[in-house]
Structures are given as C-alpha cells and as structure tokens.
Amino acid sequence: MTQPTTPSAQSLGTAGEGAAPSGSQTTAPPDEIFEAGPKPTLLHAAAALALVAVGDLFFYGPEDVGWTAGVFAGLLMLAMVFLNPRLIKRPAGLILFFLVAGLPASFAESPTLLATALFVAGLAALALADRAHLTAKFWFWAEAALLLLLQGFLRLPIDAAASVGSVHRLRLPTRTSEIIAIWALPLGLSAVFMLLFASGNPVIAKWLEPLEWFQNLELDLPDEARVVFWMALLLVSWIFLRASPFFVPSERVLGSQSPAADGTATDAATTEFKLFPTPSPAMVVRAMVLFNIVFAIQNGLDLEYLWGGAELPEGVTFASYVHSGTYPLIASALLAGAVVLLAFPSNATQKPSRWAYALMYVWIIQNVFLILSAMQRMALYVDAYALTYLRIAAVVWMGLVATGLILIVLRIIFNKSGRWLINTNILALIAVFYVSCFVDFARHIADYNVANCRELGGRGVPLDVKYLRKIGTSSIPALNKFLSVAPEKTEKRRFARYSVSVLEKSLLKSQSDWRTWTFRGDRLMREIAADAPQSQ
C-alpha cells in the first residue's frame, strides 16, 4: 500500500491551472502577506529612548525648527541602518541611503515641508530596500512604503506586548516564568497608576505614608502636552528603527500578473491601455497627419506673434494672447502623450507603418515646441504681473511634461515597458523635488518682483508688499532695496518699512535660539548687517 502524499503548492497550482477555465489563475497568492519581521532588541529600545530625549531637547519649546532638525534626521537614519544593516546590503538600498542622507543637509540650510515629506518617504522606501522584488517596480514600492507608515503606529504597542511574553525565553523555572509573564505588566501599571493617584488624592497619599520612601518622594510630572509629544516622537521613531511592516503586497500585486491567451503571464504595466481598442495602422497614419497640421497652425501662430513679435489682429491684445493659452497648451501636450501611448503600444501585435512612426516623431517635436511656447507665455506673463510660487510651479510642471513626452519617444524607440515609463517619470519628479529642497524660492521671488516693479522703473505691476511679507524673511534684502529708492511719505513705503521690522524681529528670534538657527538665516543676517550702512 502506498502512502498518501500531500500535494505541494506547485502541484496544486498545476492541477488548478488544468481544471480552471482559460484565462483564470486559481493559485494566485493573496493580495497581502504577513511578515513577522526581526524581533526588537534592547538596542532598539535604547535608540528609541535616546531619540526621544534628543527630540525633546531640540524641538520642545521653540516655535520654529532649525538646524537641529537635520541632526535629528541624521541620527534617526543612522540608527535605522545600524539596527537593520540588511537594508544597505543590496545596491538599491545603498544608493537610496546616500540619496536620503543629503536631505538632513537641507534641514540645516532651512527646514521645509517638502524636504520633510521627501525624507519620510525616503526612509519608508529604505525600510523596504532589502526586498529584491521591490527595486524595479515603483508603484509596488510606493504601496509597500505607504503600508509601512500606516501600520507603523501599531508596531510599538504590539512589540511591547510581545516583549512581555518573551520572558519565557529566560532560563528560569517554568512556574516562575509563567508568574512573571502573567503579573509583570498588571503589577507594574498598577503601581504607576497608584503613584499618579497619590499625587492628586490626599487620601491615597495618606495610605502610603507608612512607606518611608514615599514620604520623601516628590512627583514632578511633566505637562500633558510634553508627554503627548514624547509618545508621538516615540511612535514615529519606532516605525523606522524597526523597519519591518506587518503586511506587504504580494508578488501578484507587485507585477499584476495575469495569464495571456497562450498561458504566459503578462505584466499589467505593459497593457495599461488595453482598456481601449488599439487603433488600426491606417487610422494612426491619418490621425498623425491631421494632428501635425493642427499643431503646425498653432505653432506657426506662436512663431509669428509670440516669438517674432508681429502685430496681432485688431481686437486681440498681447496680454490676452499670452495669458489665455498657457494651460490649454499644457493640457494639449498631456492629451498628446496619452494618444501616443494608445496608438503606439509596446506590445502591439500589429505595428503601425514607418510613415506613422515618422509622423509621430514630428508630432512629438511639435508638442515639445508647444511646451516651450507655453513657457515663453508664462515668462512674459510673469514679466508683466510679477512672480509667485504658483507660477514657478507651473513652469516646473511644463518642464516635467516635456520630459515625459521625450521619455515616451524613448520608450517607443527602445521598446521599453510601461513600467519603465512610469519609473523614469517618477524618478524625474523626485529629482525635481530633491533639488527644490535646497533652493530658496522666496528669495528669487522677492528679488525678481522688486527688480521689475513699477516703482523702480520696471515693466511689471506695482510691488505687492503684503505678498513679500507673507513669503517670509528671505524677502528682507529685496524690501530693503525697495525702501532705498521708493518715494518718501507714501503708504506703501510705510507698510514696507513696517514689514521689514516685523520680518527682522522674526529672523533675530529664530537665529538667537541655538535650536532654531539655520545656515540660510545666518547668511541673511550677515547680508542685512553688511547692507545696513548703505540703506541708512
């Protein structure tokens, strides 16, 4: 008699595939898989408490945040890697480590919300760098990092509860270890509650008077806000010190594997446009001809009126021509990119003709020129109506759209997958964000607006002092320049002088506290001091 054997997962999968209808997959792994992860050690607890102590020293009390944010961020990242050396064993983890390591320097320069968000996202990605199946798939990596952050706030309570049960690993008699495991936490917390009640209840305090040690005990409890701050800092620090989520998306979610008609698995990233029917080659050629004609008309008008400076038809002002076309042109370029992806899929069985490809390349060139025209429109609009954060963001967005169009062409030329296109676009976006962390946009806005304002003989609108005051202390040198030449005894001059005094007080307050000091603020103080004799 033969022994009954238990079928393996692979054999079950094979049997399931044979029994399942065509196009189904009965043995797909679950959407999420549970990972217990490495258990915390005393070093984890010591590092977490040390970070809370450092964070309390650096951040609790001051209204602003300064260079100390960079020191804290660097310590957190170093502790994370020291406790989890597996994170930098793979090349992807090592590269990510050095990239994220540059962000604490931006905190020392001047902490910003963008740099903070990028640093948190970078640490979350670094916490997953030891998983080989993540490195080439941005969307899966982003999903896993988000899960890490969302689940992270449960990590400390669960680890604390699990550590109580770890007493069984000590070499104690079985009965003793059981008693400790059962009574340690209840007795400890009960003692803490009793001390707290005694500090606010004289009756309980009188009960404890026979205890000699309690007579000399003075409870100097911190305020509730500080305790909440400690707990929040401990929870956040523990997320990255542990660097181990409870659940991570499985391989099926990672690659979105779906069986093709021939039984092979295909990557969903290469079939992202299969929701729509692929147009026929004849349709693609006709579409490209018509699109090129329409875009040639628009670009020809821009060459004549925008770049060439020709006189506009009667009833059309230059301001309306410049302002009205910026965002519609960007929308047209985005739509053009979607059309190219739909008409020229990388996995199409029937490829368009060479004429279609040639016309598509010409159309992409026209789209890039269209974006350059949109940038020129924005530059002319800024020249007339001043510079703002939103207008800087619009120019950066136009550049990213142009980059995306070029990457679409490269994808088609080199027959890359949709995943490659997504990853490269996201990398371009992250690179822009990374560089932006080190740029003082407020200073550039203030200098440009003052240099081009109408009061100083520029071609722009009158200076908006209220906006320059709103964007912060970096506008002080520009406002001082405005005061040096602005007409005397005017309401705008008085408001500008008042704004400078308010901003200077804010700058002096932040720079006088060692915790909120920044390199940018220090350079600004030196510049103001050097320009003071000239302004007087």
Image (cartoon, grey):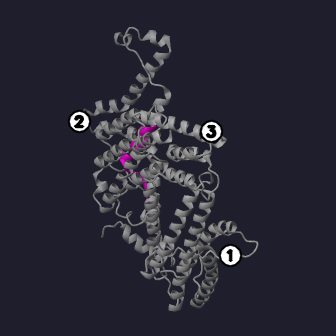
In the rendering, at what x and y percent does residue 295 appear? 61, 80
**What secondary structure prevails in the magenta region?**
helix
Q: Secondary structure at mark 3?
A: helix
Q: Would you name the residue on which mark 3 appears?
A: 494
Locate the N terminus by quadrant. Answer: bottom left
Circle 1 packing at 10 Å, graded few (<14), some (14-19), many (20+), is few
Q: Would you name the residue on which mark 2 appears?
A: 171
In the rendering, at what x and y percent does residue 483 appear? 56, 44
Report the front residue among 202 and 429: 429
338 with respect to 186 (left or right): right
- Magenta-drawn segment: 232-249
Q: Which kind of residue does numbered mark 1 sit on? A: Glu
- State the CA–CA distance, disc 1 to disc 3: 42 Å
Q: Secondary structure at mark 1?
A: loop
Is 127 above or below relative to 31? above
Residue name at image x 64 percent, y 52 percent: 462
In the rendering, at what x and y percent does residue 384 appear? 63, 60
Is 175 above or below relative to 347? above
Q: Secondary structure at mark 2?
A: loop
Q: Earlier in the sequence, mark 2 or mark 1?
A: 2
Report the front residue among 417 and 260: 417
Res. 311 mark: 1
- State the CA–CA distance, disc 2 to disc 1: 93 Å
In the rendering, at what x and y percent does residue 358 appear? 51, 88
**Residue 115 in view here:** yes
Q: Which kind of residue does numbered mark 2 sit on? A: Arg
